[in-house]
Image (cartoon, rainbow, N blue to C red):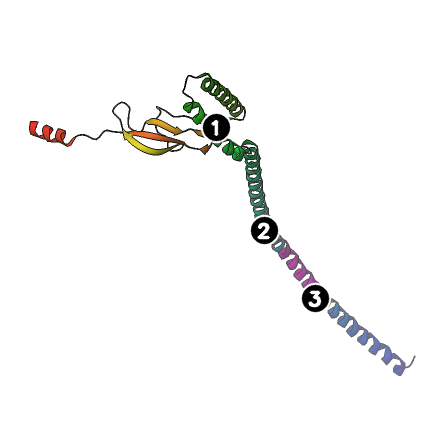
Amino acid sequence: MTKEQGQPEAQSDSELIEEVLEQTNNSAAEERVVEAGEAEQKGKQAEQPEATIDELRKQLAAAEKKAEENWDKLMRVQAEMENLKRRTRIDVENAHKFALEKFTKELLSVIDSLELGIQAASGDSPEVVKLREGSELTMKQFEAVFAKFNIEAIDPLGEPFDPEKHQAMSMMPSADVEPNTVLNVFQKGYMLNGRLIRPAMVVVSKAEDKPEGDSTKIDEQA
């Protein structure tokens, strides 16, 4: 082999060495880039769970608030339903209890006329006696029907005056009874199942007026 033929081989070794060194440097640079990327990825992965927990906590708080609001709505709806059921039940009961109120009021004028007829039939003649007995029997039948349908008469003679059930027509002084006592009943009142459908028209007692001379006499003695 000649000298000219050996030089290319020496140049090839040098180039080979440079190439190896270059590849080594490139590999090291690539490894650093990869390591930097992995470190960055690990950092992101380390931060992500904290962000997820905070978000989950916010979602949980929002869900709890929504559930509480829905629970309050449910409670209000349930309370309204209970009130509606109670009012409906009361309305139905009142409809049954007071369905006869208008009819009863119409009958009261008949009862009043019958009582006035009995009071007027005070003679002793057979015709008057028969008329009175017949009227009294009819009156008892009315009372039996009224009792069957819970219609109660208000006849407060001698009782304390009750403005909830009585209507005072006048007041009279009386020394025999306490003031605000019913002295006379012009017209009976009536109640249907505890509800007043007509007050009793009455005369109420009051204290007697003291003579003016009595106070003068007391002053002189004093």
Q: Is residue 38 magenta?
A: yes
Q: Separation of disc 3 and disc 2 at Cα?
A: 43 Å
Q: Position of residue 41 (x, y in %)?
A: 67, 60
* Residue labelled with disc 3: 33
Which range of residues does the magenta coloring cover?
Answer: 33-50
Q: Describe the element under mark 2 as helix, strand or loop.
A: helix
Residue type, numbered disc 3: Val
| Quarter of the picture holding the N terminus | bottom right
Q: Describe the element under mark 1 as helix, strand or loop.
A: helix
Q: Is residue 201 left or right of residue 31?
A: left
What predominant SS class does the magenta segment belong to?
helix
Corner quadrant of residue 215: top left
* Residue labelled with disc 1: 111
Q: Of tags 1 and 2, which is closer to the observer?
A: 1
Q: Describe the element under mark 3 as helix, strand or loop.
A: helix
Q: Is residue 91 magenta?
A: no
* Residue labelled with disc 2: 62
Front in this rendered view, residue 116 or 162: 116
Q: Is residue 197 visible?
A: yes
Q: Of tags 3 and 2, which is closer to the observer?
A: 2
Q: Is residue 41 left or right of residue 144?
A: right
Query: Does label 1 or label 3 sit earlier along the sequence?
Result: 3
